[in-house]
Every structure is written in C-alpha cells, then in structure tokens.
Image (spheres, rainbow, N blue to C red):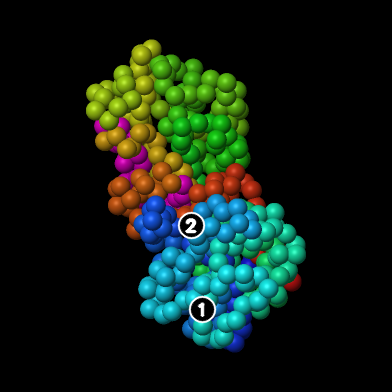
C-alpha cells in the first residue's frame, strides 16, 4: 500500500513551520457528568501530536465525540473534557476553538483542539464546501483515526482530497501496514477465525475470506449454522436455518480450492444459557434436542490449536464460545493461547476479540491488535476503506 507517512514528512523537515491538521479518534466514553471514564484513545493520539510539535509545526487536532446533531451545539457534545485531559497528559495548555471552520489562530510549537467536527453542517455527507474550507486551514492533513477510516466524511475524506498534502499518522499507518501484511501479501498458510452469533452479520466476510484463506475457522452461533449445513443436529442452539445454502456455498468454495472449514467434532453443551449451567462435553453427533451448544469441545480445540500453531498468518475476529461464562470459555482460551504460541503473524480486531485478548493476557503475543471495529470488519469483507483509497490516490500525485 503506497501512502505518504507523516513520520517521513517530519523526519525530512517538511513539517517545520507548517500548519498541520490532525484528524484523531478521541471519541472516549464519559459518565453522566461528562467525566472521561477511559482515556486510551486520547493517550494513543499523543505520539502523532508530539511528532508534529517536535517537527516545529503549528498543530490543530479534531475528532468526533458521540452522535451530535450537525449545527446544534449541546454542552454534552463538546471536546472540552478531551482537551483538558490531553493537556494534563501532555503537560501543556491546549485551548479549545469553536467556530473554527473559517479560520484558526495557531503558531508553530502550539497545539489547538478544534471543537467536535461532527457539529459542522455537511460533515457526514462529505460536503465539498466544508471539506475545501478545512483543507484551506492547513498545509498538511494527517489522518490518524483508523476507527473512522471506513467513513467518507468531510474531516476524513474530503479534506484529504483538497489539502496540499495528505498523509497517514502513525496509528493509521500501523493499521495499513498490518492489514496489508495479513491480507495482501500473507505468509501461508493463512488462517482466519470468524466467530459471532450470526452468519448474516458476517456473511460477506465469510464469502470474501473463502476466496483467499487456507483455513476458515468458524465459531459461536456461526459454527452452529455450519454444523447444520454439514448435516449435524444442534438441538436448540442459536443458528440461522435460512442461511444453510450460503454456509454450504462457503464450504464448497473452500473445498474447490483445496482448503477447508473445520466443523467441530465435539462441543460443550448446557440445558440453559446461564453462567452456572452445568457444562457437558459431547461428540458433535450426540447433541440432544434440548441442548444448547455454548463452546467447542477439547478435541476440536486441540485440532484447531495445532492448525494455528502451524499457520503463517492468522486473522482473528470473534470468540468461539460464550467465553464470558468460565464453564464455556475453554475453547476461546485454547484458541487464544495457540495464537500466542504461534510463530505466525497475527492480527486481531473486534470488541469481543479484544475482551478475550485482555482476559487471557496475550496482548504482547498478538502482533497487531486493530482498534477499529467497523473498519476492521469492512477490510475483512474485501472492501477498500475510503481513507486508504484517498491517501493512496494522493500519494500518487
């Protein structure tokens, strides 16, 4: 993937004295009183801002926060708490500018926070007029918000079209590099784990991956649908019987390429969906009519773990069982440990996946953890993200 890296502009001195506009992802959770409850995204944005300051740039940084109505400011939509927290972390005063679209007063060595960009009329529809006004504020645009990379909005796409220079910040560049390594030029075998409650929400991902991966491991409710498609009984487990043809098509597409979708040979069942429900390990052929399948069994876990340890590249999206309940967490833990032990290049994304990674403490063993839920899923679907598209176009002149 060819794109201009902001780090290269800084290292070469091209950012010195320049007006730099950074689109960050500072959409942090807050309590009812507006207090920030978790500041990971703010901390993650600092290297890009500091890089610009160290290079001698005049720095503007903005983000969306929540779901404001364009043109209708409410105190709850303000980035004021974010500017305060960023100032505390960077040990400097960071003023907040509102009504900034027509001009910003910022000098080299200074950083100004621009009020919630989604308050600007035309932001979500990528208004050309708004995008051109934003672009006129800067000499260099820096996209550093992967979580918004799948949206073509004025502050993520339009400004990149019209700014004199459009570049990827360190966070976005790392995502672009990791995704390219995992999907564009993977070390084989390439194994993808796609799990979740419904095939319907991941169908396009499954179809896209079926054309590219060597093994497609399915888990959760998705695996139940695939078990049904393979002729197995699943009791009263969550599944989508109306999508059996699609599941069979994915299995057939993999078979035609000499690849496979491993179907569980044993499962962990319960009679009720509850954390204290007694767990029973059964052969996949022995599931009773009143059983709920809540995890893969130890035999299946061991087989999949062996495949993961032999992989060249692993893409992981979704736990394979109800890992929130300890009795039904062994499958997901086994998968997580196998990924941690594998020499494969591993990339993982999605909220539940990140929760599983945190639960088993394998953050350092996963090569890249993607923070953008929707953006990560769209990449797996085979889509070219708008942010990647425009940055590649701008790098070509």
Compared to residue 355, the image places residue 10 above or below, namely: below
Residue identifier under label 1: 111
Choose between 220 and 2: the one closer to the eye: 220
- Based on the picture, tell me whether residue 330 belongs to the magenta stretch: yes
Q: Position of residue 19 (x, y in %)?
A: 61, 80
Residue 336, located in which quarter of the rendered image? top left
Residue at the image position 38 percent from the left and 53 percent from the top: 31
Q: Assign a secondary structure to mark 1.
A: strand
Quadrant of the image containing the C terminus: bottom right
Q: Earlier in the sequence, mark 2 or mark 1?
A: 2
The N terminus lies in which quarter of the figure? bottom right
- What residue is at 39 percent from the left and 52 percent from the top? 32
Determine crowd level at label 1: few under 14, some 14-19, many 20+ residues with C-alpha closer than 10 A. Answer: many
Q: How many marks?
A: 2
Of tags 2 and 1, the one toward the viewer is 2
Q: Is residue 244 visible?
A: yes
Q: Residue 24 appears at what percent x and percent y?
A: 53, 65
Q: Is residue 185 above or below residue 207?
A: below
Q: Tell me the crowding category of disc 2: few under 14, some 14 to 19, or many 20 or more residues within 10 angstroms, Cα based.
A: some
**Residue 108 shown in magenta:** no
Tell me: residue 137, above or below residue 240: below
Front-lying residue, 168 or 93: 93
Magenta segment = 327-350
Mark on residue 76? 2
């Amino acid at each position: 993937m060819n794109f201009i890296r902001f780090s290269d502009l800084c290292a070469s001195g091209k950012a010195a004295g320049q007006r730099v506009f950074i689109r960050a992802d500072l959409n942090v959770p807050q309590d009812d009183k507006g207090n920030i409850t978790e500041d990971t995204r703010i901390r993650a944005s600092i290297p890009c801002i500091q890089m610009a300051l160290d290079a001698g740039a005049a720095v503007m940084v903005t983000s969306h926060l929540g779901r404001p109505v364009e043109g209708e400011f409410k105190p709850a939509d303000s980035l004021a708490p974010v500017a305060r927290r960023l100032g505390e972390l960077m040990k400097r005063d960071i003023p907040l500018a509102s009504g900034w679209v027509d001009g910003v007063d910022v000098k080299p060595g200074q950083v100004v926070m621009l009020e919630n960009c989604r308050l600007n009329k035309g932001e979500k529809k990528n208004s050309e007029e708004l995008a051109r006004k934003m672009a006129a504020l800067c000499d260099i645009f820096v996209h550093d918000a992967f979580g918004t990379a799948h949206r073509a909005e004025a502050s993520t796409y339009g400004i990149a079209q019209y700014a004199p220079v459009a570049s990827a910040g360190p966070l976005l560049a790392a995502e672009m590099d990791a995704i390219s390594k995992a999907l564009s030029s993977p070390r084989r075998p390439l194994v993808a784990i796609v799990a979740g409650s419904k095939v319907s929400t991941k169908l396009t991902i499954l179809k896209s991956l079926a054309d590219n991966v060597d093994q497609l491991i399915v888990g959760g409710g998705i695996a139940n649908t695939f078990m049904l498609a393979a002729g197995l009984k699943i009791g009263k487990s969550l599944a989508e019987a109306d999508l059996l043809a699609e599941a069979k098509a994915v299995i057939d597409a993999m078979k035609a390429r000499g690849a496979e979708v491993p179907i569980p040979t044993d499962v962990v069942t319960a009679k009720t969906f509850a954390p204290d429900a007694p767990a029973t390990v059964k052969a996949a052929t022995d599931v009773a009519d009143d059983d709920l399948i809540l995890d893969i069994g130890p035999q299946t876990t061991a087989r999949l773990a062996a495949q993961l340890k032999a992989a060249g590249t692993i893409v992981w999206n979704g736990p394979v069982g109800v890992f929130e309940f300890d009795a039904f967490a062994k499958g997901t833990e086994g998968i997580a440990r196998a990924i941690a032990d594998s020499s494969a290049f591993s990339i993982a994304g999605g909220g539940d996946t990140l929760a599983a990674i945190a639960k088993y403490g394998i953050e350092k063993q996963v090569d890249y953890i993607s923070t953008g839920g929707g953006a990560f899923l769209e990449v797996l679907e085979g889509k070219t993200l708008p942010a990647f598209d425009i940055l590649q176009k701008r790098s070509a002149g």
